[in-house]
C-alpha cells in the first residue's frame, strides 16, 4: 500500500526533519546507554530496566520510521496557498 501524501508548510517540514535528527542523534544514544547499563546488571530474564529500555527503543524506532515516511511523502505548500 502506498503511503499517503502529507501536506506540510516549509516550517512544518523542517520541524519534522529536526525531530528525526534529534531522535536519531540524541534519543538513540540515550536508550543505547540505558540498555548497556541494564545489561550490566546481569540476568535479563527478570530485569525490568532492560525490558523498559527495549520497549522504549522499539517505540522510538517506530516513531522514527513514521516520521521518515511523512517526510518522504510530503509536499511543501506555500503559506496562504490554500
Image (cartoon, grey):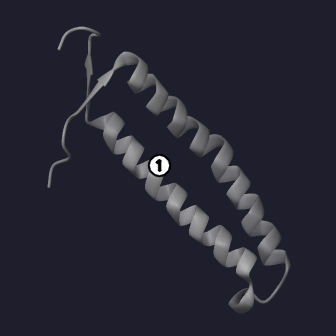
Quick one: 73 or 11, which is closer to the camera?
11
Numbered-mark total: 1
| Left or right: 48 as drawn, with respect to 13 | right
Q: Quadrant of the C terminus?
A: top left
Residue at image position (40%, 24%) is 12
Instruction: Examine the rendered structure and indicate whether residue 2 appears above or below residue 39.
Output: above
Residue that numbered label 1 is attached to: 64
Residue at image position (47%, 49%) is 64
Q: Quadrant of residue 21?
A: top right
| Left or right: 11 as drawn, with respect to 73 | right
Q: Residue furthest left?
A: 1
Q: Quadrant of the N terminus?
A: bottom left
Residue 11 % position (x, y): 42, 18
Q: Secondary structure at mark 1?
A: helix
Residue at image position (74%, 75%) is 49
Residue 44 % position (x, y): 72, 86
Residue 37 % position (x, y): 82, 69
Quick one: 15 or 24, which is closer to the camera?
15
Q: What is the crowding at mark 1: few (fewer than 14 residues within 10 Å), some, or many (at least 20)?
A: some
Residue 28 % position (x, y): 64, 52
| Left or right: 33 as drawn, with respect to 4 | right
Instruction: Examine the rendered structure and indicate whether residue 46 appears above or below residue 19.
Output: below
Instruction: Examine the rendered structure and indicate whether residue 55 appears above or below residue 41.
Output: above
Amino acid at each position: 500500500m502506498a503511503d499517503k501524501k502529507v501536506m506540510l508548510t516549509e516550517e512544518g517540514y523542517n520541524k519534522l526533519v529536526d525531530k528525526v535528527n534529534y531522535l536519531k542523534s540524541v534519543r538513540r544514544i540515550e536508550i543505547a546507554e540505558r540498555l548497556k547499563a541494564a545489561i550490566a546488571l546481569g540476568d535479563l530474564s527478570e530485569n525490568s530496566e532492560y525490558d523498559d529500555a527495549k520497549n522504549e527503543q522499539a517505540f522510538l524506532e517506530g516513531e522514527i520510521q513514521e516520521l521518515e515516511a511523512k517526510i518522504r511523502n510530503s509536499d511543501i505548500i506555500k503559506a496562504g496557498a490554500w
